[in-house]
Amino acid sequence: MTLMVMSGNSAQAYAACRARVQVIAAYPITPQTSIVEELADFVAAGTLPAQFVKVESEHSALQVCISASALGARTYTATSSQGLLLMHELLHWAAGMRTPIVMGVVNRSVAPPWSLGADHADTMSQRDTGWIQFYAESNQEVLDTVLQAYRLAEDPAIRLPVMVTEDAFFLSHTVEPVEVPDPSLVDSFLPARDARAVLVPGVPARLGSFTGPKEYVEFRREVAKAMERVPEAFHRIEQHYQSLTGRSHGGAVSHYRTGDADAVLVTMGTMTTTARTVVDEMRAEGNKVGLAKLRLFRPFPAEEFRELARRTDRIGVVDRSFTFGAAGPAATEVAAALYRSSHHPVLSSFLVGIGGREVTPNHIREMFGRLLAGKGPETRWMDLPPPAEEVAHG
């Protein structure tokens, strides 16, 4: 292991380098650009013997990865915000063709108006394209998750693409100590890709061709079945990684002091660090609160939340985006999971940090306070003044 001080973007680049990717497709967009810039430096220096393909758009970047992956190559690209939206058509192609691409996404708010702040709307709007989605809390988690993502994506029972996301600027441009595993260790964890069901030059074959209604549903079901196998495969992969590095980030959902909690907040990404500190402070004050970090969003770990619901009566789900449904996207997923639960705690949806606003300890305290006071169920925008009717009634 080598201890280095690096940003989340550098963590993405070092992980892709350690994974010995063979094809990188690159198009710049703030705040992702430095990922592919650093990879370009690795390729130019000979540190990474990969083909670096400069393209004219994010749409083309993903098409390069799909084509290379269909030929058996290990591929990587990265994007953010509007760039991810431009890829939308090909996100479906990548999943439907079962190409095990890994893509770094720096979560950034979606225009208009133009903004560079952290916001999960870009990836949440792609949650139903068939990609596995991870949300990272720290730069160390970014690096480790990219390496685990390749093992997961290339598992013969899975063969699905993966997004590894990080919050814009809070991780992408902020540096912290990161342990970078040695190449030999990564090689033992991540062997060369087992290239099954790929195209071979000179051998006639087709991937992603036309099919009729009688066969189409079988292809969709195969993707769904692969998604169903992800939780068990990921658990096994993370255990293997922990045996080599001593590190684990808690699986699909990482629990903190939830065992006897009267109220639990569910968080994603960097706000988790702030929330964990507040949990400790409120516990010291006599409040039985806990935290569940949602790390794997697709496929959604429904059973883990049904288990959590058996231990607590109040759950608040914190979303860094809004998708114009009944609540935030993660809150909607938790509600759907608990529909089949034998115990139904009060569930509240909190919207905070949208567009890159700070998620402060006071925000976290207020959310816990509302849960402990018996407020809800509710959908509440924490960054905005309270509704007029709430002010009127005190």
Image: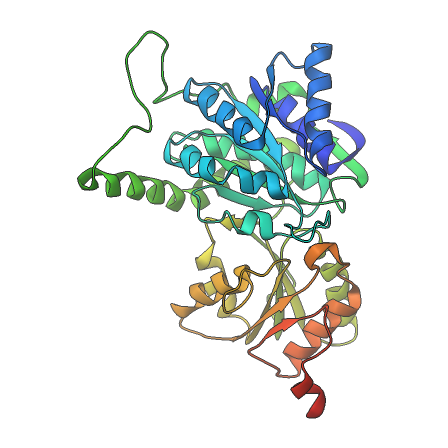
**Residue 73: percent from left, percent from top:** 48, 18
Where's residue 141, x and y in %? 66, 41
Q: Is residue 189 above or below residue 82?
A: above
Which sits in the foreground, 142 or 303? Answer: 142
Would you say residue 190 is visible in this rendering? no
Residue 4: in sight, yes or no? yes
226 to 375, vertically: above or below: above
Q: Quadrant of the N terminus?
A: top right
| Image side of residue 361 versus residue 123, left or right | right
In this picture, is 173 found above or below 154? below
Q: Which colour assignment does the render follow?
A: rainbow
Horizontal side of residue 276 vs 204, given as left or right: right
Please state if 25 lies on the left or on the right of 358 as rendered.
left
Furthest toward the left, the residue is: 214
Residue 97, x across and y down, in percent: 37, 31
Q: In which quarter of the view is residue 275 placed?
A: bottom right
- Name the image quarter holding the C terminus: bottom right
Q: Is 391 or 60 nearer to us in this picture?
A: 60
| Name of the residue lying farthest toward the top | 202
Residue depicted at x 63% and y 40%: 80
Residue lying at 38% horizontally and 46% vertically, measured from the top left = 228
Q: Position of residue 182 (x, y in %)?
A: 69, 22
- The residue drawn where x is 58% and y is 80% is 376
